[in-house]
Amino acid sequence: MNNYLKQNENSKHKLLIFSDWFYPGYKAGGPIKSVTNLSIALQQRVDVFVFTANADLNETKPYPNIQPNTWIKPIEGSNVQVYYCSKENLNRATIKVIIKEVNPTSVYLNHLWSFWFVLQPLFICWLNFKKIKIVLCPRGALFESALHYLNTYKKKKVVMMILKTLGIHKKIHFHATTPQEKETIEKYFGNVNISIANNLPDLQQPTLSIIEKKQGELKLVFIARIVDIKNLKLLLQNLQNVTSNIALTIAGPTEDKNYWEECKSIIAKFTSNIQVNYVGEITPIQVMPLIKEHHLYCLPTQGENFGHSIFESFMIGRPVLISNKTPWLNLNEKKAGWEVDIIQPNSFVPFLEEAANWQQQAFDEYCKGAWQVTNEYINNPKLVSTYYPMFEN
């Protein structure tokens, strides 16, 4: 056991987080940001430890300059302890030793379908460490769009059946990040312990900066993994029916190659008023600067538990055009953008045309409305404090 763990053996509250990916990873998107921000926010009152993999999503090469299989403090200015487990050491025995070594008050499981970072620690705690409080955040994994994704629906149903048959679900304190997620947890697990606590984004908001807007022209940006659930193809299909001049920037890894080929076939048929630039995969620090260069952020997603890229667009004062499958609703009332029913064909077209026809004053108003959404969110005094009761026995 390392010295830091020895020094903190008698702390009142210790939290051990299991997450497939953690800082400095970014390729898994929002869940990494959520759990990293959670760790940093809670460290003021709780000793936080994180057990994670030593490589990013779909990567075989470990993180550079990260020592694996030992406790380190990788986040500058933070006391969060992280154990980056190598692929060779990732097994049931290692997980059991980690839990015994940290001796946490609570264990936090980030997501639901991960074999090594959710199901294994869940069963180990249930069998061997019955006094540890188990907190599990599905992170949107129970929404229909996620359940059916990648044709794993039957396997997921089996997992839920096992948890309920053994009564393990009754030992779990579920963390829902929205009232909608609470409803989905109750739908599949019935009357269980659930706390609602909003996602924790980055809390440092930059000042509002606005770019030039010419009537009849629109700089549009889409940033997400290029897979079916993010729905890039739907955006492209809508753009086929737009008459205004639109320059679309697409950023994100092409995880589904066949899906990307379908998207490219649509792009190839665009008329001259629609220009498309695919810039490839970008890092987290490049997201907000890229959005800042555009007038409107668009994400016709089939479902988001939070939508960190949406939040980042608000944060720098850029309105959004998104689906109604996210927590961000009533946007037009706030002059922050629009949420649209993706079931209706061409539902994005009138809003794309409206945004393209904005003059500078209208664009400025929507930028201010978007910036205000974030400002109100991060200044909510209960944003962090609602988390603490979840980890207390």
Image (cartoon, rainbow, N blue to C red):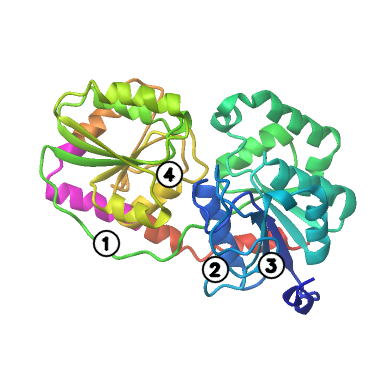
Residue for badge 3? 71
- Inspect this view and state whether residue 160 appears: yes
Q: Nearer the viewer, mark 1 or mark 2?
A: 2
Q: Quadrant of the C terminus?
A: bottom right
Q: Amino acid at mark 1?
A: Leu
Q: Amino acid at mark 3?
A: Trp
User: Is residue 161 found inside the magenta-colored segment of the image?
Assistant: no
Q: Earlier in the sequence, mark 1 or mark 4?
A: 1
Which image quadrant for residue 269?
A: top left
Indicate the position of residue 113 as horizontal and vertical percent values: 67, 38
In the foreground, 360 or 293: 293
In space, the residues marked 1 and 3 are separated at their CA atoms by 39 Å
Circle 2 sits in a helix, a strand or a loop, which is it? Answer: loop
Give the residue at x 29% y 42%.
221
Q: Nearer the viewer, mark 1 or mark 4?
A: 1
Give the residue at x 49% y 35%.
303
Residue for badge 2? 75
Q: Amino acid at mark 2?
A: Ile
Residue for badge 1? 208
Q: Please provide the residue range marked out in magenta.
A: 355-372
